[in-house]
Image (tube, rainbow, N blue to C red):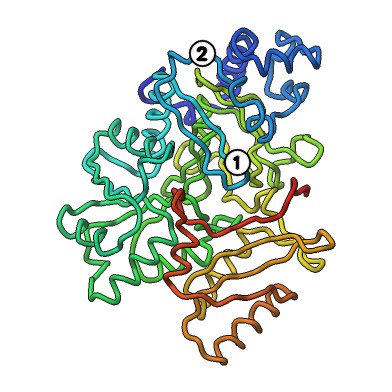
Amino acid sequence: MNNQPQAAFLPIKEIENLQQKKLQELLVYLNDNSPFYKDLFAKHAIKISSIKTIADLQNIPPTEKEHLQQNNERFLCVPKGKIIEYTSTSGTLGSPVTIALTENDLQRLAINEYTSFTCAGGKPDDIYQLMLTLDRQFMAGMAYYSGIRKLGAGLIRVGPGVPSLQWETIARLKPTAIVAVPSFILKLIAYAKENGIDINNSSVKKAICIGENIRNADFSLNVLGRKITGTWDIQLYSTYASTEMQTAFTECKEGKGGHHNPELVIVELLDENNQTVQPGQAGEVTITTLGVEGMPLLRYKTGDICIADIASCTCGRNSLRLSPVIGRKKQMIKFKGTTLFAPALFDLLNGMADVRDYVVEISSNEIGTDEVLLYLLPGDSSDATDHKIRAYLQASLRVTPGIKYIDAETIQKMQFPESSRKPLKFIDKRSGIIKT
């Protein structure tokens, strides 16, 4: 595999030809090596020789998350002796799924993140402070580490949490960039204010934001993004990725969506009937991995709802760009006649001055409809603050969810249970599969 993939800069027709060639290679590989896809092709009488273009993928049924959960080992295309790394999904939308990687897959992962960091303005003379876990089978942490090494930049593995340690390390080792969850960056800002740290005089000039949206669907900064940049003069770069796709979509300096690496993954956006949506319309991100050896996926539905922009970017890249995740199918909430997506609810709570932190819990009531309970850390415990919070929620949502006020220690334990790799802000206690 080319050490410095530049496929996104190719003319659109050449990108299309490249993807079609890689797709045909993948179909042959799956038919020869994947028990799951071999059965799928036989069951639906699919002749892989007839799948020649991206449009022809419509003739193959999509793969769902439940398929991976229930048939995990049947997706494996290599002998177990060739696996050198076992990673897993976080389990945000169900039970975790194991993704096994070969040496070639690890190299591909490094190339993906090398491309992502260069897209986000990364250079060999940068120093990145990683504010995330590199253990607990977390693919992303390993990927960031490998990509930055390939870039030739410096690395500081501090791990998640502990603002005091993060700032002490920043002062001592002078990183130029951080890789962090955006809501944690707000905690860094709060700690700096409380302890007289001049954040705009620090060495950090950019942040690679992971795990949470910092932009709206039109690419403008959302409340979380504005809260960060309103205090800290720092360049934010948004990212979108998942363990299953083993690929990331990362912004360039233009901040107009996550760039697609066309040599690593095919992207479709599908509607409820598994048909491709029109450009500019929201659809479920459905991916086909290219170049994956251990557990490649064909038309895998991620559950994430995004919008694609197919116009060429002013940075020179011609592949499509994905909007932030505007919703997740299994995180759709139907509450008292109102349909909510978790990202929109998070954005609302992030914009409330009287709410310092939160966890959203969804459950089913006795008649099978959704109930919403907000665990809130308020600015203070006064009746006036409670009234303002409830009035704001009623005005914004037209319905008032349940509210339970908790202290900082309790919310920390809720957001970071023992097995957590990233902040847990959405707890879904509903039974069964949520259909949108």
User: Separation of disc 1 and disc 2 at Cα?
Assistant: 24 Å
Task: Give the residue type that dot 2 points to.
Answer: Val
Above or below residue 81? Residue 15 is below
Residue visible at 56% across and 19% down in the picture: 76
Tell me the quarter of the picture where residue 334 sits: bottom right
Residue 315 percent coordinates (x, y):
44, 41
Q: Which mark is residue 78?
A: 2
Residue visible at 59% across and 10% down in the picture: 33
Q: Which mark is residue 15?
A: none
Closer-to-camera residue (141/432): 432
Tell me the quarter of the picture where residue 416 sits: bottom left
Task: Give the residue type that dot 1 points to.
Answer: Ser
Residue 125 percent coordinates (x, y):
21, 42
The local crowd at label 1, few if under 14, some if 14 to 19, many if 20 or more residues have their Cα within 10 Å, is few
User: Which of pointers 1 and 2 indicates the residue nearer the eye?
Assistant: 1
The residue furthest left is 172
Task: Give the residue number, with chain letter if any, for mark 1.
Answer: 95
